[in-house]
Amino acid sequence: MSGSQDWKPRANPWLIALVVTLAAFMEILDTTIVNVALPHIAGALSSSNDEATWTLTSYLVANGIVLPISGFLGNRIGRKRYFLICIGMFTVCSLLCGLADSLPELIIFRLMQGFFGGGLQPNQQSIILDTFPPEKRGMAFSITAVATIVAPVLGPTLGGWITDNYTWRWIFFINIPVGTLTFFAVAALVEDPPWVLKQAKRGIDGIGLGLIALGLGSLQVMMDRGEDDDWFGSPFIVLMAVLAAAGLIGAVAWLLTAKKPIVNLRVMGDRNFALGSFTTFCLFAIVYSSAVLIPQLAQEVLNYNSTNAGLLLSPGAALVCITIPVVQRVMGWVQTKYIVAFGFLAIGCGLTFSTFLVPYIDYDTLAEMRAAQSFGIALLFVPISTLAYATLPKELNADAAALYTMFRNVSGSIGISLATAMVTERTQIRSAHLVTHLNPFNQAYNDTIQRNALTLQSMGHAAGTTMETATGMMYTTLRTQSQVLAYSDVFMFCAIAAFCVVPFAFLFSSVKAAGGSAGGH
C-alpha cells in the first residue's frame, strides 16, 4: 500500500499533462468547429441545412452517452489502452469524415467520432488527477483550463477561416497530424498507477448502460434539435423529452441500487464533488450561452462574416490564458471558495455590462464585453476543479472525472439551446411592445416617416414609392431594435443566474483542510 501512496510517474508530469490535454483539446475543438461549415457541407453533399445539422447532433449524442461510462470502459479495457484506442479511432474517424461522399456517410462517421471522442476528456482528467498530488493539481488544471475554454472559442473562428480559404473537409483532416502525434506521445509517456491496475474488473451493467444511453441520447437530440423543430410544438421533441426524463430518472434509480453499477453515483455523496459538479454545470451553461450570443448578434444583426464574428471572442480567450496562471498563484494565499464566489460575481458584472447593447455597436465594444465576461470565467475553472476533487479518494477519480465532464458538456448544450430559444422569444416580445408605438396617431412616428420620405426623394427615389420605402425602413429599424433588446435581456438573465450561484461557493470545504487529510473524506 505504501508503494501505491509513493508512486510517481516515470515521465515528467508536466509533459504528461500537456500531451493528454492536447488530445482533449482536439476533441473539444471538434464540438464547435463544424458549426460554421454546415452550409458548405450541405451544398457539397446535396442536402438541406436542416439535414446537415444532424452531423452536429450525431456527434453530441454519441459523445454524451460515452462520457459517464468512460470510467467503466477504462476499468474493463485498461485506462491507458482505452485512452489510446480513443485517440487512434478519433483520428481515423476524422479522416473518414473528411473523405465522406454523402451525408449519411458523414453522419455515421461523426457518430463514431463522437463515440471515441467521448472518452478523451474524462480520461485526460483522471490521468492528471493521478499524475499530480492534490497540492499541485491547481497548476495542472491551469493547462486543462486553457484547452477547455479556448478550444470552443477557437473552433468557429478556425472553422470559418478553413472553409472560407480551403474546403470544409480540412476541418477534419487537421486532426490527423495532431492525433498521430498525441497517440505516440501518450504511448511513450503515460502509465497506469498501481491502484488503477489493482482495481477489480467490473461486470457489464446492461440495464444501467441502456438507461444512460436512452436518457442522455434523447436529451442531446432534444436540446440540439429543439430550436429548429419548434420545441414542444413538435411531437418528435415531446417524445425526446419524455424518453430523456424516463431514461435519466430510471438511470439514477438503478445506479443507486445496483450492486455493481456501470457508474458509481455515490461519488456525489462527497460534498465538495457535488458542489463542484453543480457549480461547473452552472458555469458552463453560462459560458456556452454567452459565448454563442455575441457571435450570433454580430452575424444576424451586424452582418459580420463567420470569421470576424468568431474573432470577437479572441480577446476574451487571450485574457483567460493570461489570468489563469495568476489565479493559480492567488489560490496559495486566499481560500479557494472565496475565489469561486468572486468569480461568479465577476461573471455577473461582466454580463451586466453586456446588457448595454445598442444597434450598430462597434467591434471594439463587443470585444470588450466578451473580455469582461471572460475575466470571471478565468477565475473559476481551476478553483472549482481543485475543490471538486480535493476530498475524493483516488480510487474514485475515474468515475468522478467521467461524471464531472458529463455535467460540463451537457450544461453547455443546455445553455446554448436555452440562450438561442430565449433570444427568439424575447425578440417577439420586444417587437410586440415596440410596434404599439408605430401608428398614425403617434406624432414621432409620423415625423420620422416624413423625414425618411424626404431623404429618399432627395436621393432621387420616385415620389410615388418613397412613403412605402420609408415605412419599410421603419420596420427594419423596429426589427433591429427588438433583436438588440432581446440580446440585452438574455445577457441580464445570464447575469442573474451567475449572481444566484455566488452563495453556493461558501458551502465548499477549504482545499487546505482537505489536503491535510490526504485527500480523504
Image (cartoon, rainbow, N blue to C red):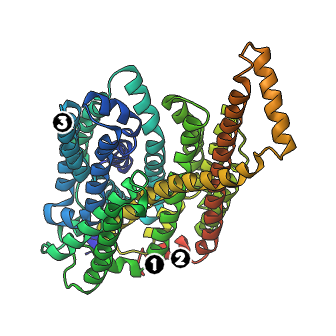
Q: Which residue is mark 3?
A: 96
- What is the crowding at mark 2: few (fewer than 14 residues within 10 Å), some, or many (at least 20)? few
Asked whether 22 or 118 is in front, the reply is 118
Indicate left or right for 210 with 226 as reference: left
Mark 3 or 2, closer to the camera: 3
Label 1 Cα neighbours within 10 Å, binned few <14 / some 14-19 / many ≥20? few
Q: Earlier in the sequence, mark 3 or mark 1?
A: 3
Secondary structure of the residue carrying tag 3 is helix
Residue 247 is situated, as x and y percent measured from the top left of the image, at: 28, 73
Residues at marks 2 and 1, CA–CA distance in whole angstroms:
7 Å
In the rendered image, residue 466, in percent from the top left (x then y), is placed at: 73, 24
Image point (18%, 36%), residue name:
96
Q: The residue under label 1 is which amino acid type? A: Ser
**Which quadrant is the N terminus positioned in?**
bottom left
Q: Which residue is mark 2?
A: 513
Residue 188 percent coordinates (x, y): 21, 44
Q: Secondary structure at mark 1?
A: loop
At x 31% / y 59%, what residue is drawn?
64
Q: Give the image quarter of residue 109.
A: top left
Q: CA distance from mark 3 to mark 1?
A: 49 Å
| Residues at marks 2 and 1 touching, judged by CB atoms closer than 8 Å | yes
Residue at the spot 21% in from the left edge and 75% down from the top edge: 208
